[in-house]
Image (cartoon, rainbow, N blue to C red):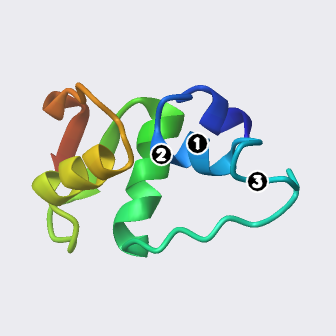
């Protein structure tokens, strides 16, 4: 939960907060696209994301996902595509 603490105003942090979770060891279920969610976590950890150009996740879809989770003012230049 320390990673979530770095982004206290996001939906993810609120879902894990004491307001919504009485047991801090309980699991959270996030009903979203798992393929994109891994990149949301990468963004949270690193402040930037590199997407494979041939992958199913596009820059636009990741920006929508970040917006859904409450990340505001995401700089699109922090999401890069790698062409191999």
Q: In the displayed structure, does residue 25 sit left or right of residue 13?
A: right
Mark 1 and mark 2 in contact? Answer it, CB < 8 Å: yes
Could you tell me which secondary element the residue under label 1 belongs to? helix
Q: Which residue is mark 3?
A: 21
Where residue 42 appears, as percent x and y from the top left, is 46, 46
Q: Which residue is mark 1?
A: 14
Tell me if I can see residue 83 in this picture. Answer: no
Could you tell me which secondary element the residue under label 2 belongs to? helix
Quadrant for the N terminus in the image: top right
Q: Nearer the viewer, residue 9 or 53?
A: 9
Q: In the displayed structure, does residue 25 sit left or right of residue 38?
A: right
Q: Residues within 10 Å of mark 2 (few under 14, many from 20)?
A: some
Q: Residue at x 38, y 48 (%)?
A: 69
Where residue 73 appears, as percent x and y from the top left, is 23, 25
Where residue 55 appears, as percent x and y from the top left, is 21, 71
Q: Which residue is mark 2?
A: 11
Instruction: State which tag comes first along the sequence, 1 or 3.
Output: 1
Q: Residues within 10 Å of mark 3 (few under 14, many from 20)?
A: some
Q: Quadrant of residue 52?
A: bottom left
């Amino acid at each position: 939960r320390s990673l979530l603490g770095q982004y206290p105003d996001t939906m993810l942090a609120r879902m894990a907060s004491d307001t919504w979770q009485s047991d801090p060891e309980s699991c959270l279920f996030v009903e979203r696209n798992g393929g994109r969610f891994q990149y949301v976590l990468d963004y949270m950890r690193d402040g930037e994301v590199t997407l494979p150009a041939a992958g199913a996740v596009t820059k636009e879809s990741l920006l929508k996902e970040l917006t859904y989770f409450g990340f505001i003012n995401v700089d699109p230049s922090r999401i890069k595509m790698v062409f191999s």
